[in-house]
Each structure stands twice: as C-alpha cells, then as structure tokens.
Image (spheres, helix red, strand yellow):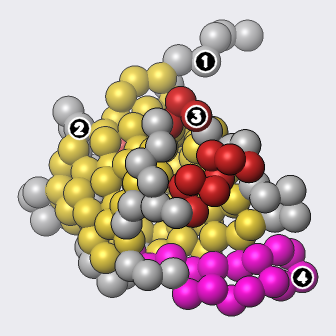
C-alpha cells in the first residue's frame, strides 16, 4: 500500500453564534451551533464563509466526546459557491473539557479535534474540489474554530 500523503488545502476560520441546546436526546446531548461567517485561505482557494447559512449539529456522547456534523457555504474570491460538509471528533480530558466549556483559549495540543471534509461546487474553475477528501486539525477558541485543512492525495 502507498503511504497516505496530504498537501495543505487552506486554513478555515469559522465564527460562531450562541448555541441552541436541545438537551439530552436518545443519542446524547444535542446542540446546534449557528455559523455567523468566517474566512478561508490557501494557495488555490480563498474567500469567505457565508453568514447565517451553516451550522454544527453537535452531539455530546455519553463518554463526553463531541461529534460534529457541519454544513457550510463558502464563496471564493472569484464568486464561486462551494458547499462544505464535515464530520469530526473532539475529545479531551475532563479538566481540558471544562476549560474549553468556560471559553478559555486552550492550546490545540491539549485535546484532539479532527475532521473529514467534503466539498461540492458547480464552478468549472473549482470543479476539482468535487473529487477530493480533506482532513482537518482544529482548534476551538471562544466564539470561533480554526482548522488547518489538508487534501488527501
């Protein structure tokens, strides 16, 4: 088998609105986190995260791990629209989880935040994004999340 290789795709910064807490459901504690905008920038793609279009249907499992289920709309600097979806996992020690819940700026090395990303567009210039999978390493900050995304080659 060929070793897994990646190349940097872009940095994504997402700004978040206040959380809607659905409370305990059959699957765990469900929260909906609306996205208020953001930006992305890399060597081949850059632009903005459209405000009020996306969100994270965040699930806190019984083991305190968080599962992200996110849909976003991106607009490139040349005006193309790209749908972005990703699923992810965030877990940490109870102490780090408490710090994150209080809104502290915790170094990303203290917890695990990873995503699997899919992109979709009708733009002929950016059609290549339809045929890739990207993975991301994230950092949760107060009122925003930052990901470094890498295309899997």
Residue at far left of view = 78
First in sequence: mark 1 vs mark 2: 1
Q: Nearer the viewer, mark 3 or mark 4?
A: 3
First in sequence: mark 2 vs mark 3: 2
Residue 132 in view of the camera:
no
Residue occupied by mark 1: 4
Cα–Cα span, label 4 and label 2 = 39 Å
Q: Main secondary structure of the magenta part?
A: strand
Residue occupied by mark 3: 110
Residue 29 placement (x, y as % from top left): 76, 77
Q: Which residues are magenta?
A: 20-35
Q: Nearer the viewer, mark 1 or mark 2?
A: 2
Residue pictured at 39% horizontal, 61% vertical: 142
Cα–Cα span, label 1 and label 3 = 25 Å
First in sequence: mark 1 vs mark 4: 1
Q: Residues within 10 Å of mark 4 (few under 14, many from 20)?
A: few
Query: Disc 3, disc 4: CB below 8 Å?
Result: no
Residue occupied by mark 4: 26
């Amino acid at each position: 088998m060929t070793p897994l290789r990646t190349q940097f795709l872009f940095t994504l910064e997402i700004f978040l609105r206040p959380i809607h807490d659905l409370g305990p459901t059959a699957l765990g504690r469900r929260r909906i986190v609306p996205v208020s905008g953001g930006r992305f920038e890399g060597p081949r793609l850059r632009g903005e995260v459209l405000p009020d279009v996306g969100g994270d249907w965040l699930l806190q499992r019984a083991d305190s791990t968080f599962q992200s289920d996110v849909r976003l709309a991106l607009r490139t600097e040349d005006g193309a629209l790209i749908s972005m979806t990703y699923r992810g996992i965030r877990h940490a020690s109870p102490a780090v989880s408490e710090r994150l819940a209080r809104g502290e700026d915790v170094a990303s090395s203290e917890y695990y935040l990873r995503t699997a990303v899919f992109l979709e567009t009708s733009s002929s210039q950016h059609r290549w994004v339809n045929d890739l999978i990207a993975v991301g390493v994230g950092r949760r900050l107060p009122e925003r999340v930052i990901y470094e995304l890498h295309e899997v080659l």
